[in-house]
Image (cartoon, rainbow, N blue to C red):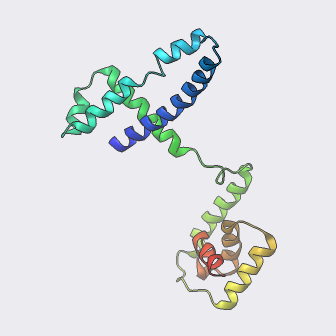
Amino acid sequence: PLDTIKKGLNILKEQAHEWKTRLQADLQVKKKLSKEDEQWLDGEGNLVDEECIVDLLERTSDYERSLMQLDSNDKQVIQKLQDLANASRKQPGKKHKCPELQVWNVLNTCKKKMKKDTWSVAKENATLAQQIEILDWHHEQRKSQQETAMHFNTKYPCLCLKQPIISAWLKDE
């Protein structure tokens, strides 16, 4: 839990740093700060409370007891930091974002079908000929490793292909 809170604080610091950098650039050009910017610096941009709470929790020997002794404002700050950390974990990176949800729906239905069909089949290792066939198809079709695994799981259900296996084979090429 403390690691999550620290992660949330780091995310908050990064966000504040970007805003403060922009404000400093405006000040160097002798541009006046807007009221919104001043309010942000006094409120959300001021991370003293957050840092003090995290520092207090780091120094304490009994984390749970210290957490219970915090007042409601401090608990709200901790909840905010935890939410920030959890929100950053849930967002997929650029590589993992899928513009078309249909592709993922197809893959998910294939997974469900696969689990029903292959649960009673013993797993086997792929022969060299099977590996070559699978990798050739992967290169010709220019499909993702996951899609390649799904495609060949219907043809070779005993192999129980998954993306890491295809990735290892590609690395060994």
- The residue located at (33%, 41%) in the rendering is 2
Report the side of 142 relative to 91 (left or right): right
Instruction: Locate the C terminus by quadrant.
Output: bottom right
Q: Is residue 76 visible?
A: no
Q: From the viewer's perspective, is 21 left or right of 1?
A: right
**In screen coordinates, is 142 left or right of 117?**
right
Q: Position of residue 131 (x, y in %)?
A: 67, 84
Residue closer to the observer: 42 or 134:
42
Name the residue furthest right.
140
Q: Position of residue 68 (x, y in %)?
A: 24, 30
Image position of 140 with respect to 29: above or below: below
Q: Quadrant of the N terminus?
A: top left
Q: Nearer the viewer, residue 165 or 42?
A: 42
User: In the displayed structure, would residue 135 be above or below residue 83?
Assistant: below
Q: Is residue 155 visible?
A: yes
Against 101, residue 128 (above or below) is below
Residue found 42% across the figure and 25% down from its top: 47
Residue 11 place in picture, x, y as percent: 48, 37
Q: Quadrant of residue 81?
A: top left
Front-most of residues 95 and 38: 38
